[in-house]
């Protein structure tokens, strides 16, 4: 199968423009699994919870998810994308997985970063694996990368690929995702954004790009640059992620000494 990322530079608050531009890029890709960045429709740096609620959308009825559903059906593809999800008076930093038949699953970010804690509700969904055609897919969002338990929880449930919508500003995440692939023997697809936002005085954010696909053996199969919008796809064999042996006598899951954990 071919797996892909779309690296974007959204304009804050211009949701329909950002969504339509992302869909145009998806339409040009030759891939059956495509990952978009965190908050791909709205931009990242909200000034207040009120502003967030005004821009957030319900899932699956909002424009951002509906357009993904349409392009997924047209292409016969599966798409993971990060967006602001409104639920009543709360808003979550969420990711959706859609396919040719519509919405498959929603994940709400567990580990909120910096000022996200002031405006987003804490994620309340478990780390869960979904079927996306022949492959098993898990989702985590941006800062979740720092917590190895997130990727491990998905791998233990049989994930072949971890989809990782992101708005990364810390420079060491791309290297850390190589480790997440190695320690769990899974593919990862990190879709990041580029550009800058400084909507809050004194808190300029520069997004590092460097979207990538990594293999269960720690290979960077494709990586974007740090300044421009890009989209790329790469051929992968998802069955590689189902072999968990390092040597004939070492299995990464069976060898875990859970009897010694947390003592």
Image (cartoon, helix red, strand yellow):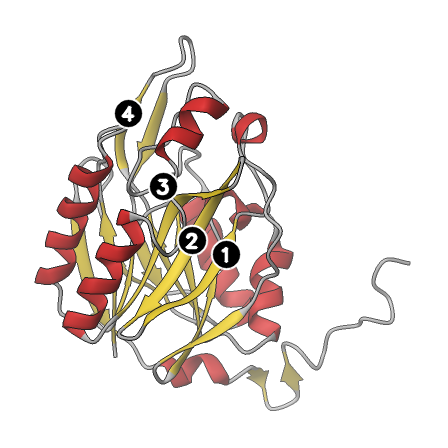
Question: Could you say where residue 209 lies in the image, as x and y percent from the top left?
Answer: 29, 41
Residue 153 pos. (x, y %): 62, 66
> Which tag, 4 or 2, sits closer to the chain's start?
2
**First in residue order: circle 3 vs circle 1:** 3
| Tag 4 near tag 2, CB within 8 Å | no
Query: Which element carries disc 4, helix, strand or loop?
Result: strand
Q: Earlier in the sequence, mark 3 or mark 4?
A: 3
Residue 211 is at least partly visible in this image? no
Q: Label 4 crowding class (10 Å Cα cut-off): few <14, some 14-19, many 20+?
A: some
C-alpha span from label 2 to label 3: 8 Å
Near-viewer residue (201 or 160): 201
Give the spatial CA distance, label 4 vs label 1.
26 Å
131 relative position to 3: left or right = right
**Residue carrying label 3:** 39
Which labelled disc corresponds to residue 95? 2
Q: Label 4, on which residue? A: 196
Which callout, 4 or 1, points at the residue further toward the start of the chain? Answer: 1
User: To which residue does mark 1 refer?
Assistant: 107
Please name which of the two marks, 4 or 2, marks the residue nearer to the observer: 2
Asked which secondary structure carries label 2, the reply is: strand
Residue 47 appears in which quarter of the rendering?
top left
């Amino acid at each position: 199968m071919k797996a892909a990322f779309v690296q974007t530079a959204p304009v804050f608050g211009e949701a329909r423009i950002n969504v339509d531009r992302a869909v145009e890029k998806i339409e040009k890709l030759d891939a059956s699994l495509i990952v978009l960045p965190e908050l791909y429709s709205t931009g990242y740096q909200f000034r207040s919870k009120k502003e967030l609620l005004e821009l957030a959308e319900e899932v699956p009825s909002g424009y951002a998810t509906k357009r993904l559903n349409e392009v997924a059906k047209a292409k016969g593809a599966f798409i993971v994308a990060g967006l602001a999800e409104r639920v009543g008076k709360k808003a979550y930093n969420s990711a959706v997985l859609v396919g040719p038949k519509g919405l498959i699953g929603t994940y709400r970010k567990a580990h909120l970063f910096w000022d996200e804690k002031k405006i987003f509700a804490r994620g309340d969904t478990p780390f869960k694996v979904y079927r996306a055609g022949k492959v098993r897919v898990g989702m985590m969002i941006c800062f979740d990368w720092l917590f190895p338990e997130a990727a491990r929880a998905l791998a233990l449930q049989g994930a072949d690929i971890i989809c990782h919508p992101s708005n990364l500003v810390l420079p060491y995440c791309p290297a850390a995702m190589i480790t997440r692939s190695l320690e769990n023997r899974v593919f990862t697809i990190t879709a990041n954004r580029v550009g800058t936002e400084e909507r809050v005085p004194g808190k300029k954010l520069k997004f590092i790009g460097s979207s990538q696909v990594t293999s269960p053996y720690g290979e960077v199969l494709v990586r974007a640059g740090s300044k421009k919008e890009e989209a790329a796809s790469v051929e992968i064999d998802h069955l590689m992620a189902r072999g968990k042996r390092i040597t004939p006598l070492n299995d990464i899951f069976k060898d875990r000494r859970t009897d010694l954990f947390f003592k």
